[in-house]
Structure formats: structure tokens, C-alpha cells
Image (cartoon, rainbow, N blue to C red):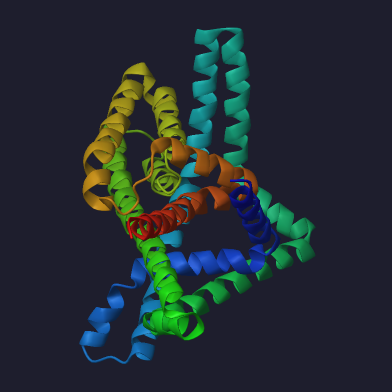
Amino acid sequence: MIIFISVAALVVYAFVALRAATVPLILALLGTALLYPVMPWLVGHGLRRSLAAALTCVVLVAVVCGVLGVLTNSLVHSAPQIAESLKQAGHQLAGWLGPTGVKLQQGLADAAGSGSSAGGSLVGSLASGVLSGLGIATEFLTGGILALALVFFFLRDGHRSGDLVHSLLPAERADLVVACGQRAFAAMAGFMRGTTLIALIDATFITVGLVILGVPGAAGLGALVFLGAFIPFIGAFLSGTVAVLVALADGGLGTALWTLGVVLAVQMVEGNILQPVIQSRTVELHPATIMFAVVAGAGVAGILGALLAVPLCAAAVGVVSVLRGTSTTAAER
């Protein structure tokens, strides 16, 4: 056990210390897991693997840029409305809760100020520190190019990874390594495909509900719901809370309760129907494990760590399940 914890701590330390390379690598693996089923279809229609991989990467860039553009536009245009509504909700809660409400009001005011001035803060930071801004932009651009290049190579040559492992290791060990890799890859693929589809469904239905209720900034709140879905439990709680507070400030207690009902209904459908049907058994993690992974990932690497924690944890659990199955089989022999 001590050896296992030591190795895990060393891996986490290496991940953080080499994040300029490890983060693009993990993002590339997640992107490949999401897109890899497209390759057999393209190759089956007569395209060479290089051309199929390149075409898939072009589509990936177009889709990512389009999604980011829509989300950014929605958040930027809705941020002032959401921020003002949060301030009004703080005033109402302060009146209802007394001293406790005053503290909560101050917290909401700070959050609203941060949200409404996010664009201005970014521009100001870039203007006051050009070198720092260029450094961040260069690091982001370099990481994005590296991740995209890795996605291309993983898509084109991923089918050869088993042969590579067999050429480097003895047959029995090579089979075990390949089985672990396939199980980890399947877990990440299940997480990415399932979470993306669930996030899209959640955001669509909640946005429609907010529009029907007349809640201001519905598009921006829907974008928050979509992004929050990739951080299990915490993301859904935060985005739903913001939606209810905005509804409280704009439409009063009745609208807030209806908004809460819409959010809870969508979350219940997600938890009881969408999660079991869409993700099935590909990412079978206990809720306590997921919450611990998200908090630990956020503590290690902030928002990015929270986003990557669950797929990495799912991959690790998949590897452990393969190793346990191998150990059981060996013991039976």
C-alpha cells in the first residue's frame, strides 16, 4: 500500500511538473477517444488512414472553435444580466436572512463583479502586462498545436500500438499491457462521449425551460450548464444555483421555484435515465470516488484538474480491474 501511494504521488508530481507536455497529451487522448470510432467509417469508404485522420482533425478544430465561439458569445452577452441579477438576489437574501444574508450578499456581489468584469480584467491584464499575456497565449497555442498533432498521430497509428507493445515486451506481459491500455482507453472514451451528450441534453432542456420562464441571460446560463456538466456534481450544483438566483432576482420567489423545479427535473432525468443508458458500465465509479477525484484534481491543477480528474480516475480503475482479473486468474491456476 505504501509503495502504491508513493508511486501515485510520484506520478501526480510528474504530471504537475511536466504539465506543459502532460496536459496536451491527456487532452489528445481524450480527443482521440471521442473521435476514434470515426476512423473505421472513413477508412471503410476508401480514405487512407492519413487522409482520414487529417480530415477528422480539421473537423475537430472547426467544431471546437464553433462551440467555443457560441459559448463565449453567450457568456459575454449574458454576463452583465447575470451579474446584475446576482446582486439583486443578494439584496433579497440579505433582507430575508439577516446577518447571515449580509455575508451571503457580499459573496454574491464579489462573484457578480468578477463575472461582469471578466472580459475587462482580461483586456486590462493583457494591456498592463504584454509579456505575461504573450507568454500565456504562446503556452496555450503551443499546447493546442501539440495536442492536435498528437490526436492526428493517435488516430492514424493507434491501431499499431498493440504491435509496438508486443515488439518491446515479452508476449505475456505485452498482452497484459495491451489489455490495460484498451480498458483505460475505453473508460476515457465512455466518459467523453457520454458526458458530452449528457451536457448537450441538459443545457438544451434547461435553456428551453429558462426561456419559457422568461429568465434573463438564458443563453449564458445554458452555456454554464453545458460547461459545468464536465465537472460532475460540483459543476451541476453551481450552474443550477446561479440559474435559480438569477430567476429569484428577476421574477421573484415563484419564478425561482419553477426554475429550481426545471433544474431538479433535468438532473433527476440525467441521474436516473441518461447516465445509466448513455454511459452504461464504461465509467462505473462510485459517487464518493467521483467527488473525491474532482476535489483532488481541483486542488492539484485548478479547473483543468477538476475537468481531467474523472476520466483519469476512470482509466485508472479500468486498469486496476484488468490487473485484479489477471491476479484472480493466476491464483485459480
Q: Nearer the viewer, residue 59 or 215?
A: 59
Q: Is residue 152 visible?
A: no
* Residue at the image point whose x is 42% and y is 42% from the top: 232
Q: Residue at x 51, y 83 (%)?
A: 168
Residue 31, image quadrant = bottom left
Most foreground residue, 14 or 322: 322
**Looking at the rendering, which quadrant does residue 143 occupy?**
bottom right
Q: Please report the residue visible at 46 percent of the width from the left and 44 percent of the height from the top.
A: 78
Quadrant in the rendering for residue 54: bottom left
Give the quarter of the figure containing the C terminus.
bottom left
Relative depth, front residue between 155 and 7: 7
Residue extending furthest front? 333
Q: Is residue 261 left or right of residue 188?
A: left
- Measuring from the top left, give residue 158's x and y in whole percent: 40, 79
- Horizontal side of residue 54 vs 262, given as left or right: right
Q: Could you tell me residue 125's position as x and y percent?
A: 73, 54
Residue at 55% in and 26% down:
87
Query: How many marks can you see?
Result: 0
Q: Is residue 272 above or below residue 58?
A: above
